[in-house]
Image: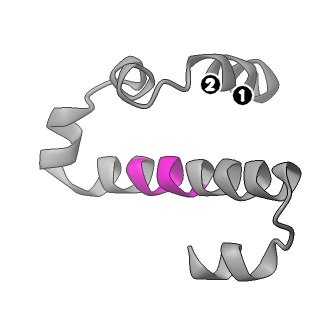
Amino acid sequence: MFLISSSVHGSDEHGRLLRRTLMRYVNLTSLLIFRSVSTAVYKRFPTMDHVVEAERIGNKLKSFEKQSS
């Protein structure tokens, strides 16, 4: 988090949105890694639909799935 906030400069709206988006991707990546390693996290998020519901990332996930197929 500190690396992102120190690397992405700007106190304007664009910089703030860029930092926020990068942190969302970092959090999602961490969740996916923890989900594959931890049974407790896997029980909380057994499918990607549960992740989408909890994180409210539906539109971005759909576009990601289209790109990867």
Residue 1 falls in which quadrant of the image? bottom right
User: Could you tell me which residue is drawn at 45 percent across and 23 percent down?
Assistant: 52
Q: Read off the residue under disc 1.
A: 64
Quarter occupied by residue 57: top right
Tell me if label 2 and label 1 are in contact, CB under 8 Å: yes
Image-quadrant location for residue 23: bottom right
How far across and down, in percent of the image, does residue 35 sit?
31, 47
**The residue tagged with tag 1: helix, strand or loop?**
helix
Task: State the extent of the magenta-drawn residues as a range.
Answer: 26-31
Residue 55 in the image: above or below residue 41: above
Pick the residue in front: 27 or 9: 9
| Observer-nearest of 58 and 45 | 58
Mark carried by residue 2: none
Q: Is residue 10 above or below residue 19?
A: below
Measuring from the top left, give residue 61's x and y in whole percent.
Answer: 62, 25
In the structure shown, which secondary structural element does the residue marked by tag 2 occupy? helix
Q: Nearer the viewer, residue 12 or 3?
A: 12
Name the quarter where the C terminus is drawn. top right
Q: Main secondary structure of the magenta part?
A: helix
Magenta segment includes 55: no
Residue 67 pos. (x, y %) = 81, 26
Which amino acid, mark 2?
Leu
The residue singled out by tag 2 in the image is: 61
Residue drawn at point x = 74 percent, y = 20 percent: 63
How crowded pointer 1 is (Cα within 10 Å; few <14, some 14-19, many 20+) is rated as few
